[in-house]
Amino acid sequence: MEVLMLVNGAFDLLLALMLIGVAWVVLSSPDLFRAVVLFVVFGLLMTLAWVRLDAPDIALAEVAIGAGLTGALLLSAWARLSRYSDKADQNAGDATARRAVEGIGRGDHIKRE
């Protein structure tokens, strides 16, 4: 029984460290595609964390909305931005949208001290 508790504790610690590490890489990644893919991975890890906390309803919502729907929307936005990246300077709206998505990908919206 003690061994099982030790393994569970080690797994929870590893999961927490992975969540922190993936979140850091997502926020500091200069590559948008990598940031979006790691955002989906973060959502899947959060789902696992909610399952470990015995909250299956929140885990289902996280995997459906957080990783699934939001990830698909971000990948779609990335595909559109990469398709029009050469023409972004011709249209001010496209350039503004690109800068906004890049800023979110880099974590510019997070207040740093």
Image (cartoon, helix red, strand yellow):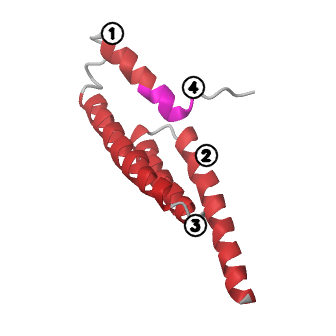
**29 to 64, vertically: above or below:** above
Amino acid, disc 3: Arg
| Whole-number angstrom distance, CA of label 1 to CA of label 4 | 21 Å
Query: Residue 33, located in which quarter of the rendered image?
Result: top left
Amino acid, disc 4: His
**90 to 10, vertically: above or below:** above
Q: How many marks?
A: 4
Residue 27 picture location, percent across and down: 56, 39
**27 to 110, vertically: above or below:** below
Residue at (57%, 39%) from the top-left corner? 28
Q: Which residue is mark 3?
A: 52
Residue at (49%, 53%) from the top-left corner? 58
> In front: mark 4 or mark 3?
3
Tag 2, which secondary structure? helix
| Whole-number angstrom distance, CA of label 3 to CA of label 2 | 22 Å
Q: Which mark is residue 24?
A: 2
> In front: mark 3 or mark 2?
3
Q: Which residue is mark 1?
A: 92
Asked whether 87 falls inside the magenta stretch, the response is no
Q: Main secondary structure of the magenta part?
A: helix
Q: Which residue is mark 4?
A: 109
Residue at (31%, 33%) from the top-left corner? 77
Report the magenta residues as a range: 101-108
